[in-house]
Amino acid sequence: MKQQLCVCARVLLLTVALGSPHAFAQDGKAYPGASCQPEHPQDRSIAYYWGGRVRNLSSSVSLTLSCPVIKDQNSGIAGAWIAVEDHHPSFSVSCTLSSWLVDTRSLTARTVTVVDSQTFTTAGTPPEIPIVILGGGFSLSLGDYYELRCTVPPFSSGRMSGILYYHVYESLP
């Protein structure tokens, strides 16, 4: 009886620990694709915003987007998910999440350096699967700020590719 009680107590303790928000502590944030902005000002005319997403209106050039990521923890990135539409038969949607470090040693010139990055792509995804979730759990080193940068191919056969939404998870200390 005492042995059964001990096993039950351990199972209960494990269940409480795994169910606790601190067991897999992450600070997740969701962003609409529409929060992404064209990297180059001349590309504003080919960025089409509708329904919280951003798509590429061009039939000939890819659209490069810079997407904000809020940093409010000091322990790095634990993962990210990016929902994209890829309707182009030959070109892929590609996204890179980067952690940047600002060198403040010089008072006259500030330099920024990529500390760590993770790239995701729709390459190899069958064309009959137009909406793809890129990303997963991974570790990205702590930096001074983060950036998600995506390249979206031109539209093909009357269908536009784009970014629907993205989630970024920071590790909690």
Image: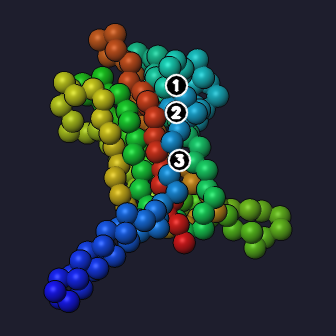
Residue type (three-letter) at the residue carrying disc 2: Pro
Residue type (three-letter) at the residue carrying disc 1: Gly
According to the picture, the residue beneath numbered tag 3 turns out to be 29
According to the picture, the residue beneath numbered tag 2 turns out to be 32
According to the picture, the residue beneath numbered tag 1 turns out to be 52
Check the image and tell me how it is coloured: rainbow
**Front one among 134 and 150:** 134
Q: Residues within 10 Å of mark 1 (few under 14, many from 20)?
A: few
CA gap between label 3 and label 2 equals 10 Å
**Front one among 62 and 147:** 147
Q: Tell me which label, 1 or 3, sits earlier in the chain.
A: 3
Question: Against 47, is 157 above or below?
Answer: above
CA gap between label 1 and label 3 equals 15 Å
Question: Against 115, is 130 above or below?
Answer: above
Q: Tell me which label, 2 or 1, sits earlier in the chain.
A: 2
Q: Quadrant of the N terminus?
A: bottom left
